[in-house]
Amino acid sequence: MKCPVCGYHESKVIDSRPAEENSSIRRRRECIDCQKRFTTYETIEIIPIVVIKKDNRRESFDRNKILRGIIKACEKRSVSEEQMKKIARDIEMHLQNQLQQEIQSYQIGEFVMEKLRDIDEVAYVRFASVYREFKDINTFMNELKGLITKRGKLKKK
C-alpha cells in the first residue's frame, strides 16, 4: 500500500478490525520508510445489479427502495428498524452472491415476502397486497388461506 505522506510502496498492518456492519475491514498501517500511520478500508468489489421491471425497463438495484417498501409494510407493527435493515441487507447479499448482473423485479419481491412471512404475518400480507396487486377481496382471501395453510404445516413439524 502506497504511503499517502511520502509515497513509499510498503507498509505494515498495525491493527485490523471489522467496519461498516462487517461489510469492510479497517486497517491501521504504518509506512516502513517514514513511520507515519494511515488508515485503509478493504471492501468486497460489488457487481452492479440491474433490475428488470414488469414492463422490461431496467434500473439499477437500490437497497433503499426495498427498505422503503419493508418500512411501509411494517408500519405500526412490532418489527424493529434493525430487523427491517437486516432483511434489505440479506437480500442484497443474496443477490450479490448469485453473481448475476440482472434480476427480475418479481424475484426480489418474492425474497422480501419470504423474509417478512417469517418475521410478521401482517407485514407480509401488507407487502403482498401491494406487490401482487390484489384486485379484489377474493385474491386477498386466497393469500390469507395460503398463509394459514403454511402456518399449520409449520406447527405440525
Image: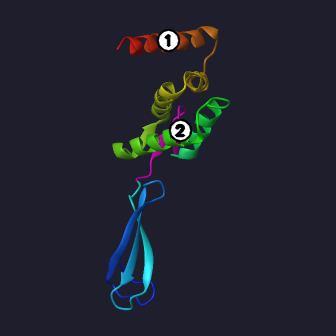
Whole-percent x and y of residue 118? 47, 26
- Tell me the residue that label 2 is attached to: 83
Whole-percent x and y of residue 134? 61, 18
Residue 126 in magenta stretch:
no
Instruction: Please give left or right for residue 65 compared with residue 114 in the image.
Output: right
Q: Amino acid at mark 2?
A: Gln
- Tell me the residue that label 1 is attached to: 148
Label 2: which secondary element: helix
Q: Residue at x 56, y 23 (%)?
A: 128
| 101 shown above or below 70 | below
Instruction: Please give left or right for residue 119 compared with residue 27 in the image.
Output: right
Whole-percent x and y of residue 109? 50, 31
Check disc 2: other Cα within 10 Å, few if <14, some if 14-19, many if 20+. few
The Cα atoms of the two marked residues, 2 and 1, are separated by 23 Å
Point out the stretch of residues depicted in magenta.
47-60
Q: Residue at x 58, y 33 (%)?
A: 79
| 124 shown above or below 63 | above
Q: Amino acid at mark 1?
A: Ile
Check disc 1: other Cα within 10 Å, few if <14, some if 14-19, many if 20+. few
Residue 49 in magenta stretch:
yes
Q: Quadrant of residue 36?
A: bottom left
| Quarter occupied by the C terminus | top left
| Quarter occupied by the N terminus | bottom left
